[in-house]
Image (cartoon, rainbow, N blue to C red):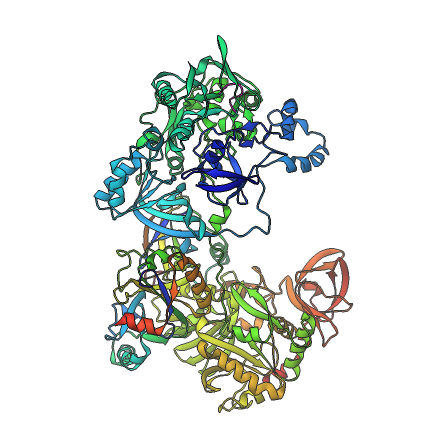
Amino acid sequence: MRGGVGLCDVSWLAKIDLKGFGLKAAPSLGPSADCWHLGACHYLATFDPEARGAVLRSIQALTGAAPELDLPPPVYATEVTSVYAALLLAGPKSRHTLRKLTSLNVSESALPDGACGQAGLAHVHTLVLRRDLGGLPAFLLLVGREYAESVWEAIAHAGQEFHLTPFGLEAWRLLSL
Amino acid sequence: MSFLLRCPHCGDRSVYEFRFGGEVKPRPAPGASEEEWVNYAYNRTNSAGVQTEWCYHRSGCRQWIKAVRNTRTNEVLETFYPEENAR
Amino acid sequence: MSRFFFDGEPIEAQPGDTVASALYRAGRRIFTRSFKYHRPRGLLCLSGHCPNCMMNVDGVPNVRACVTPAREGMRVRHQNAWPSLEQDWLSAAQHFDSLMPVGWYYKTLTHPSAWHVAEPWIRKVAGLGDPPPPDAPPREYEHAFLQAEVAVVGGGPSGIAAAFEAASGGAQVILIDDQPEPGGHLRYTRPGEAPASIAQLRGQPNVELLARAYCFGLYEGGLLGVLQADPHPGAHERLVHLRAKRVVVATGAYEVPLLFENNDLPGILLSGGARRLLFLHRIVPGRRCVIVGIGARAEDLASDLRGAGIEIVSLISPDEVLGAVGSTRVEGLRFRGGSVTCDLIVVCGPLLPDAGLLSQAGARLAWSAAHGAFLPADLPPHVTAVGRVTGSGLEPAVPLPPGEVRAGKRHFVCLCSDVTSQDLVDGISEGFEHIETLKRYTTATMGPCQGRMCQLPAIGICARETGRTMGETGTTTARPPSPSVTLGALAGPRHHPVRRTPMHYQHEALGAVWLDMGAWKRPRYYRTAESSEERRCVQGEYQAVRERAGMIDVSTLGKLEVRGRDAGRLLDKVYTNRFSDLRPGRVRYCVICDDAGIMLDDGTISSIADDHYFLTTTTGNLEFVEQWLEWWLAGTGWDVHITNLTGGLAAVNLAGPQARDVLAGLTGLDVSAKAFPYMACRQALVADIPAILLRIGFVGETGWEIHVPAESGEDLWKALLEAGKAFGIRAFGVEAQRLLRLEKQHVIVGVDTDALTSPYEADMAWVVKLEKNDFIGKAALSRAAGDPREQLVGFVMQEDGVPDDGSAVVMDGRPAGRVTSSRFSPREGRAIGLAWVPAGLAGEGAEIRVRVQGRPLLARVTRRPFYDPEGARLRM
């Protein structure tokens, strides 16, 4: 996978959808969570389920506004862990694989580490979240859970040219170090 | 037809990523005449020139925006989020 | 070295050979037969422009052999000749050319039945090549999406220079070239002189080279369509969508033939074709050669050919030439003042800018006599042109318009369609004087070469015959794709998105027969140990629901969470009934109309809290409802936020007289009729899984719609099956559900309603709350509250026969209405359904006739549900 590209199912990652007029600026959720800007006043938090406690406390601080105390406009948090399947595409050839599937510009300048974009990927609406892994370019691809199997097949097919290999938790842990 | 629209959030995208929502026109007040309602429901100005229209970024951020476009040349002059209280 | 097969015979190919060059080296001179007259044709351009080398390669028809690299094991077959290229019986057509003048369909086939007799025969012999047989192995096509700051089309000397200049300036460049190696015309005019610039270019990190790729279209917004051959071992073709901020067109110039008698004979080569054979493939095309051309071009060519050992018999000026001599190959040339024998004629044809892409981008084409060509002008701001495509270095080869037009039946202007100068002159004399109408009447320029070989001489003839200048005559409109593109490449990888519910593999294990609903897979019915036959299985499922308990996977329902201080306000605005007064723990049926009062969708809305609602929509309409709600919200500043939960929740509808017994065994929640009445919603653990339960009834029995997180869907399904075993529970599919709901006359929006249906016509006046403040459709609906002209009614057949969905309701022998849904009901013993009928026939008991397999059968209108009209079983 280091020479080409690998694909890993990380749908177990926790995801929380944040919306509200109180989100005109990016919320800060602590070091355990990544916060992705999906639209005006719309963010998605992704994090390892083990950090759930800490992340929920940060979110509570945002959403616990009491209108009668004249605090900022409310923020609504919705649990969407089950709504999205998450596929991690990683390796030097991950961009080459992606550009066979989506018209989203995933070049280094257009989508640097930590940036996100939304577009069709294999004809399915996808959230593309760039989060490099162990020095390798890597992309977290979020699709509606019902599409997961179908999109996996499309990515695996496009990645054949680069000898795409599926990888599991062990390899993921090793790369994350 | 393959012109680009600048989504305020996502940047330049192909027009096919959007769903066309029709020209922007004011909705009659509840007590308006039948003629005004019929005109609103069934008639379009359909300008040959600059018009303001609704676009839904269905392949991207899934937000509604307004676009000002010249229907003769497909030049998109401006795109913006709908202003508050401007329906 | 490699070996491929031509018509079953092995052919040796050297490295770098194309299919055509290998066949030529092996001695072949006839490569195809022409479209109409089946005249023998040989290599002419060697550059993929003319139609003379088209063959079937590995099952793919109409492949240009002269630009297709030879591969080990390739199977090549000839086209358009029977029994062989050397002996084609259909070449007898030439003897009947007087019966086939220009526009002959309109002149010869004038008797009313003539076309019907002639058409099958014309179809048999028409066309070029055969489509692949149905069992041919599928070919792999790919798509790719690239972005560039600068796209350079054409890897010849000007293109390479332009790419290098842009890259040195820091731009990210993509260079597109259709040959295996860049270099353009230098590859066969100055072979061995690989410019230093190519090596420099390869060294630049911000330049990407797409080789063996041709650009077939330049579209709005800087979009280029590019077709790349053999991108990697696993794919045959790749369609590249390339977005560029700036486009540099460096496509160069191509050469076209000269016009004289028998100018299409094998053995006549364009100067560029001869050079490609000599310098790219090291093949000597003949021994005794006549060059048709003047000036330095002809001299240079003579010197190149002599250097290869070819005897140059004569250099002849084009206006001296009368015609080539020979039957299946060149044997000599006749000219004013005599004739010579030869086995090769090389013509210095006009060089024309390959400006199609520039025309597509909106450039004007202006005639330049000094260049002997139409040159591109008025380019749009983001497009530039460099090199020979601008006309630089080009000179006229023949005067245009010609001094006189030699109209002859063997003077071929359009090689693709066998259109001669005689045909063009006749077409003009018949009144088709405009170049666009002349094109369509004669079909000149409408063949595989897309006008490359023939447009210029055709315009020349048109100008001369109508007394106009070349500029006044003008060109025909250039449109993409040019060159042509395979349909398979446009379609791309054979992958369609499939949506599977969390219980998909449970259904597989239960013997589901699948139904496609959009991209969703749903069980239509389940095969049992006793039967696989649909009707019996559906009946078994139906009986289970009516008599015991049934369970259906309804995970495909659209599900939206609507939250915010103004959530109730938005729902009141968008839906026809009231929701701001819906108490937490209650569910209400909901309908959306547009401002013309037309029904757009229906579903349910449950109140979780004052500022928190849970919406369900029909399976196919979720995207629409989400967009619709967001649109009415846009710009209002209301505090409402909508989240799509569809894939995140698995849902099962458990229904039947014993559904309560099944459910009670899996939850601690009090599910008695008193504690959990009809149209209530609760949250509780079911089989230890956190669930939302909605007590609603689409199929007319006591039932619950149970929603759980998707990852627990399988567990819920298995738990229900297990708990239901003792009660004889059955899983039921979409077909059984359709029948069950039909007995209750429950309307399905989009099936029983259409783009003209208001709630009044669908017998749902109760869902419209006109006393509300403004909502969408209120103005139209308050005006329409009177008697509608058409009504949706239930009916039961009085005779045997099951109408198809969509069958006509007839009155006095004429269609008066339409059946929307119809199924055989075991309970009634006859077919039942819903139908649109005129208001006059909408009364209870009215007799109507329904057309079933052509016969108008009797049916009776029933306004009340066929099953449990009071709805008592729902509320138990």
Q: Is residue C235 visible?
A: yes
Q: Nearer the viewer, residue A40 or C400?
A: C400
The residue located at (67%, 74%) in the rendering is C537
The image quadrant where one finds the C terminus of chain A is: bottom left
Q: Is residue C298 left or right of residue C525?
A: left
Q: Is residue A15 visible?
A: no
Q: Main secondary structure of the magenta part?
A: loop
Relative height, residue B60 to residue C271 (above, below): below
Tell which of C283 and C246 is nearer to you.
C283
Q: Tell me if residue C770 comes above or below residue C228 in the rendering.
A: below
Q: Position of residue A101 (x, y in %)?
A: 40, 57
As for residue C261 lying within the magenta part, the answer is: yes
**Residue C29: percent from left, percent from top:** 52, 29
Q: Is residue C856 magenta?
A: no
C50 to C226, vertically: above or below: above
The magenta stretch is: C259-264
Among the 4 quarters of the image, the one containing residue C377: top left
